[in-house]
Image (cartoon, rainbow, N blue to C red):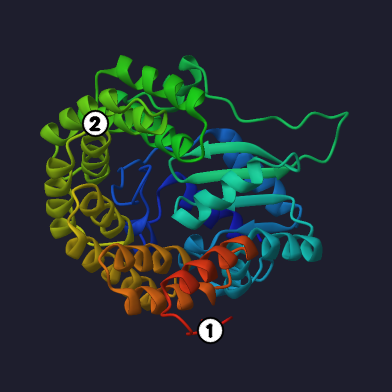
Amino acid sequence: MKNTTRILILILTGCVTLPLLATLGFTIFHKEKVFDLKAAPPEKIISLLERTLDRHQSVFLSPEYYPAIPAQDLKGLPSLIESKKAMSDVSNFYRLHRERHFTLLVFGTFPDSIAMVTNLTDSPLWILSGVSPWGFILVPNISTTTKTPIWSPPSQEALTQEYPNATQRSEWLIATAENLISIGRMGAAEELLQSATATGKCIASLHGAQASLAAAQGRWNDALRMARQAHGEDSRNTAATEILSRALIECGHPDEGLDVARKLTDQLKNQETLFLLARAANAANSKAEEIEALRSLVGMARTQHQLLGASLTYLGQAYARNGERGEAIRSFREAVSQRELTTEQRLLLRGMIEHLSPEGLVPTKN
């Protein structure tokens, strides 16, 4: 357990140079940009890990961390299969929690982790105890008499002492703010971005994060202005480019938004950029391009064993708008069979299938 403590600390401090960290990042949308942060995160995160692991208490670790930990050091943790299953649905997580009684949850920044952190922190059962560029720490809210400390932005003095280098301090502030935005903690994110502004460092990344915040708050004109600045300062900032495309659409410039989405997808093709391309094509009434983007999205999700319900539903709708009734029905039928859909969603899809089906054809029920 001592070794596991050390490895987890290295992961959270950014000192492990393993393939896992090449895929970790800190943007509100796709996790691409990786900051070169060598300084340690707040001491309380390290001490919390040390204290919990050394006491042999039960820890949940999100799947993205597992490749960085040697197999012999995973004995006290759920298996990777158990962790993945728990992340697939919150009911699965609570089923595993009832078996293991977790006293510490460590989540990274992959989309599934963001979704789970958002879900759990909406519950009174868990408290957000730590946030850093590398992820989130949650602890159970088990006592009404002894108040569990809730994470709050560090003071300027504490942060300067922790990160005396202004560039590293700005990187930490921006990356942590973007993680906060992704889980809906806008006030704390704004506070960190104000502190980052005061450093005068990492201007392109700062503008990108400010665009993320504005977009998350629905301030699309501000988001457009900031995203243009960030994109102009660093065209490789894919998160800022995504926001630029979305903001152009929201501000009534769908053709320009589609052009930006096309260029982004040429540069980086993943589920997030393909969905953005489909959304931009829909806004610009480019039906064939929307269908092609959604077909690619579904194909990628199949390959990566991701959830398909939403993608298939969007694809079915795109086919229906284009008058391709048969393809729409096939997409909706497959969507109905996906386990993540609710009963209400399945009923709606069956209604759409029935509406699209030729007279007298009874739709397949799943």
Q: Whole-percent x and y of residue 305?
A: 44, 75
Which image quadrant for residue 239?
Answer: top left
Q: Residue at x 11, y 48 (%)?
A: 259
Q: Residue at x 47, y 73 (%)?
A: 353
Q: Whole-percent x and y of residue 110?
A: 44, 55
Q: Is residue 17 left or right of residue 273?
A: right
Sooner in the amino-acid sequence: mark 1 or mark 2: 2
Structural crowding at the residue carrying mark 1, measured as other residues with C-alpha within 10 Å and reported as few (<14), some (14–19) or many (≥20): few
Q: Whole-percent x and y of residue 254?
A: 18, 42
Q: Amino acid at mark 2?
A: Cys
Question: Which residue position is annotated with label 1?
Answer: 364
Which residue occupies the foreground of this view, 33 or 359?
A: 359
Q: Is residue 109 left or right of residue 100?
A: left
> Could you tell me if residue 187 is visible in this image?
yes
User: In the rendered image of this protein, does residue 172 appear above or below residue 242?
Assistant: above
Q: Is residue 123 left or right of residue 62?
A: right
User: In the rendered image of this protein, does residue 185 appear above or below residue 12?
Assistant: above
Question: Which residue position is annotated with label 2?
Answer: 251
Which residue occupies the foreground of this view, 31 or 156?
A: 31
Q: Is residue 212 left or right of residue 11?
A: left
Structural crowding at the residue carrying mark 2, measured as other residues with C-alpha within 10 Å and reported as few (<14), some (14–19) or many (≥20): some
Q: How many marks?
A: 2
Q: Amino acid at mark 1?
A: Thr
Q: Residue at x 25, y 18 (%)?
A: 200
